[in-house]
Amino acid sequence: MRTARLLNNSVVGMLPWMVFSLVSGPGRYGYGVIAALATALALLALRHATGQDAAMGVTEPTAVAVFAALGVLGLTAPENIVRWLESYAGEVTNLTVVLLCLVSLAVRAPLTLPYARQKCDRDLWREPDFLRTNRVITAAWALAFLAATVADACGDLILHNPDNLWTGWLVQAAAFVTAARFTEWYPAVVRSRMGTGEHEPPVRDLLLPFVGLLIPAGILSLVFDGGPRYFSVGLIVVGVVLARALRKDAGLREPAARRQLK
């Protein structure tokens, strides 16, 4: 089932946290909590309905607990606490994911492991390459959420503008998109190096989604005055040029890769 395959992806487990990080902010705290909690509950319901409970790690149940608690705090806490939450809850939740990743690595049970186990035979679960791959991917997610935390903190503490287009949305979105792409790209690299005959994807394939973000980033920067006009236009131009170059290169490499596999 397509839904079941989709759920067997660590990116899906990170969705509630990413949603809150991108939606929350002054005046949007309640919306962020509702969106993140609804996403986490919907994922749990889908897992139960499709029999994918075994693929569930700690990220989704923890998300339900954390965002439910934040919702209760938003409704019952004094006004000064709510104001603090509106400013810094994004950093707190992002750091929660970083902590989850680090603890899972410390106990040798990477956060992405339950999802990855649903995609391969049980015989591979204890293979060093399988475990190492999940450690690397979990570390990549830790770095992505740490980057989002730093960006959010820069907007709040340095720029004193939590609604800054770059620190509040674009930098964080770029970090999450890159980690999501790495989650798919790195296992393919490992499999190719294990002699499976699979073509090894180049680093440029990892960068393609990030390059694709340059165009909408430039457009949003123009629309919302996120920087000098020449900078915004430059992002769009660079994004178009790089995207076309990468796609052209991918088109040239595909026939060569097929010939290698014959």
Image (tube, grey):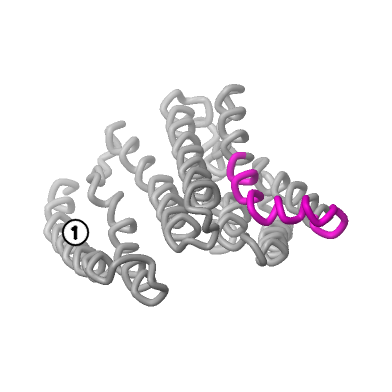
Q: Quadrant of residue 104?
A: top right
Q: Is residue 250 above or below residue 230?
A: above
Helix, strand or loop for the magenta stretch, by majority:
helix
Tag 1: amino acid: Leu
| 93 magenta-colored | yes
Residue 46, image x, y percentages: 68, 61
Q: Position of residue 69 (x, y in %)?
A: 80, 50
Q: Is residue 211 visible?
A: yes
User: What is the magenta range?
Assistant: 74-95
Indicate left or right for 256 with 235 as reference.
left
Q: Residue 9: x, y in percent?
A: 53, 50
Residue 179 in the figure: left or right of residue 246: right
Q: Position of residue 161 (x, y in %)?
A: 52, 58
**Relative height, residue 249 to residue 112 (above, below):** below
Horizontal placement of 235 versus 66: left or right? Answer: left
In depth, the one of 61 and 131 nearer the eye is 61
Give the residue at mark 1: 246
Q: How many marks?
A: 1
Which quadrant: the N terminus?
bottom right
In this orientation, does residue 49 appear?
A: no
Residue drawn at 33 percent across, 56 percent down: 210
99 or 2, which is in the foreground?
99
Q: Residue at x 35, y 46 (%)?
A: 185
Give the secondary structure at mark 1: helix
* Residue drawn at (16%, 62%) of the image: 251
Report the side of 79 relative to 26 (left or right): right
Residue farthest toward the right in the current orientation of the protein = 76
